[in-house]
Amino acid sequence: MTAFDELEKEAMLLPKDQRLKLAQDLIASVEEVSETSQEEAWNTEIADRIQRFHKDGQSVSAEEVFARLKVIAPGE
């Protein structure tokens, strides 16, 4: 039996309210890492987009974007 299996077996013996608290704490510990990773990914994406914009030097007005959108997806 692995350490995980033993831990799981013991956790299942806890009262329902304690199991719920444990589950919430475990999920929160994973979400914190996930939120940090997401933030880092977005920061990288933003930096890449800014770099591409400065490199290409092209911008498109909102009016042109919406006009193209009407052609691509009319009625949407």
Image: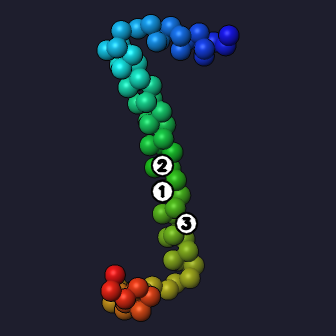
Indicate the position of residue 43 as horizontal and vertical percent values: 48, 56
Residue, disc 1: 42
Closer to the eye: label 2 or 3? 2
Amino acid on which disc 3 is placed: Asp
Residue, disc 2: 38
Q: Residue at x 60, y 16 (%)?
A: 4
Other-residue count near label 3 (Cα within 10 Å), few / some / many at <14 / 14–19 / ≥20: few
Q: Residue at x 53, y 10 (%)?
A: 9
The answer, for residue 61, to whether it is visible in the render is: no
Which SS class for mark 1?
Answer: helix
Other-residue count near label 1 (Cα within 10 Å), few / some / many at <14 / 14–19 / ≥20: few
Residue, disc 3: 48
- Disc 2 to disc 3, how far (Cα)? 15 Å
Closer to the eye: label 1 or 3? 1
**Could you say which quadrant of the image residue 24 lies in?**
top left
In depth, the one of 4 and 12 nearer the eye is 12
Image marks 2 and 1: residues in contact by CB distance under 8 Å: yes
Indicate the position of residue 36 as horizontal and vertical percent values: 47, 42
Q: Residue at x 44, y 88 (%)?
A: 72
Rendered view: 63 above or below 35: below
Amino acid on which disc 1 is placed: Trp
Counting residues from the N terminus, which is met first, the one under dot 1 or under dot 3?
Answer: 1
The N terminus lies in quadrant: top right
Indicate the position of residue 28 as horizontal and vertical percent values: 41, 30
Q: Residue at x 52, y 77 (%)?
A: 54
Image marks 1 and 3: residues in contact by CB distance under 8 Å: no
Image marks 2 and 3: residues in contact by CB distance under 8 Å: no
